[in-house]
Amino acid sequence: MALVEVEDPGSLGRKVGVTGEDPRPVAPGLDVQPASDRRRRDRLDQPLFDGLRGELQLAEGRGYFHEHVEVGEDGDLAPTLASAFRRVLLLMDAKRRIGDRVRRALGVLRAFSIRLPGGPKLSIDVEAVCGPADSGDLATDLAGLFVELGEVARDHDTGVLVTVDELHYVTLQTLEALVMGLHRAAQLRLPITIAGAGLPSLATLTGEAKSYAERMFTFPVIGSLSDAQAREALMVPAQDEEVAWEEAALGRVVEETQGYPYFLQEFGKQAWDVAEGPKVITADDVERSIPVATAELDDGFFRVRTGRTSDTERSYLRAMAGLGPGPVRSAEVAAVLGRKTTALGPTRDGLLKKALCYSPRWGEIDFTVPMFDGFIKRWIPDLRTLSER
């Protein structure tokens, strides 16, 4: 499997994508080849993915059936997966006219959903098929479900891809079950896989879920756009309208946004609106638009995501921002607040779960997006204003 870190303009923070090992029926299983052979095969045969879009294009090219889901903040992925698998099976039957084989798989899925605590009330007009995926143990049952769907896809020369966003919210128990299910499908060489996106902490969580997950995943990083990519993102849409950017104007926007895609979009939009034109966006246009773009991000991006924080969490964020560009040591944040690191552990964990921060290494913490520290300083000019409440 592969983990791919991507930027998601519509979400907060850098993203990590989880993809299953190449699920073609001819691909070797995880436990069949020595690691050296597997790595050689990966270098020669595995494509490079451009985030979830690349996964989806690859799957569509192979005729796979695709569904997309998103993990809620409660971290309960199993009911959402069950609904996605139902849609896949119904679509597979509609296109391939599989009939009885799909009905059996739907029966297995119905039995699985019935056993889920508070599971979805799936509209499945078949009798429940007991045995493969209704033991009550999530890991065992999810593995059984993966095998059932994978066998249907294999027997009818197709495959299944489920893309999952916000995967960092998933509970450790569910992530463990997910890894086990994918592992079992890979062992049986079944054409079913998952591609997911989450914050960088997902890499650590995956290792905690199952020790053998390190053999199933890689973690290449795709962060902010390079200088050249960021400039292209600004120039090409303008060129389509026969408008050019001054070199200094481009440099200023890239510097201010640090190449973060969503911020490039916002700053580019405001520069376009402010520019007097008619054919050139100047450095002066950009300077005049920066306060407008910053205010838009403060009100429409940062403030929305920090609104659910407690005073203690806000103090922690302000202490981080005051220490300068991250990552910073958790012990340094505690020192600023005059607290012990252990006493602030729950506060730190709360910020990680809210996806406002992530931990790049043990004992370190950083904001999930550029410019976050600047917003915190504008929002909370003085740490003492919080401590006095």
Image (cartoon, grey):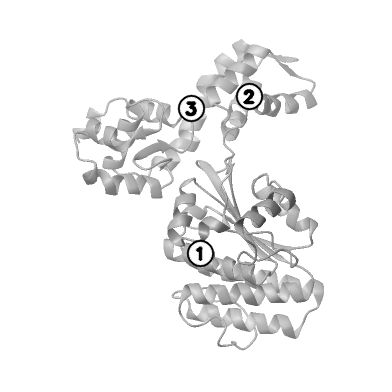
Is residue 13 shown left or right of residue 262? left
Is residue 351 shown left or right of residue 15? left
Contact between labelled residues 1 and 2, with CB atoms less than 8 Å apart: no
Q: Which mark is drawn over residue 295?
A: 3
The CA distance from mark 2 to mark 1 is 37 Å
Q: Which mark is drawn over residue 77?
A: 1
Image point 46% across, 56% down: which residue? 207
| Three-letter code for the amino acid on which mark 3 is drawn | Ala
The CA distance from mark 3 to mark 2 is 24 Å
**Residue 49 placed where, x, y %?**
68, 47
| Three-letter code for the amino acid on which mark 2 is drawn | Asp
Q: Establish if 186 lies above or below 348.
A: below
Asked which secondary structure carries label 1, the reply is loop
Image point 63% across, 54% down: which residue? 36
Image point 79% across, 62% down: which residue? 63
Q: Nearer the viewer, residue 50 or 69?
A: 50
Q: Establish if 140 lies above or below 34.
A: below
Determine the image quadrant of residue 330: top left
Q: Nearer the viewer, residue 248 or 181?
A: 181
**Circle 2 residue:** 227
Q: Is residue 75 visible?
A: no
The CA distance from mark 1 to mark 3 is 35 Å
**Residue 140 placed where, x, y %?**
51, 76
Mark 1 surroundings: few (<14), some (14-19) or many (≥20) residues within 10 A: many
Q: Which of the marked residues, 1 or 3, is nearer the chain's N terminus? A: 1
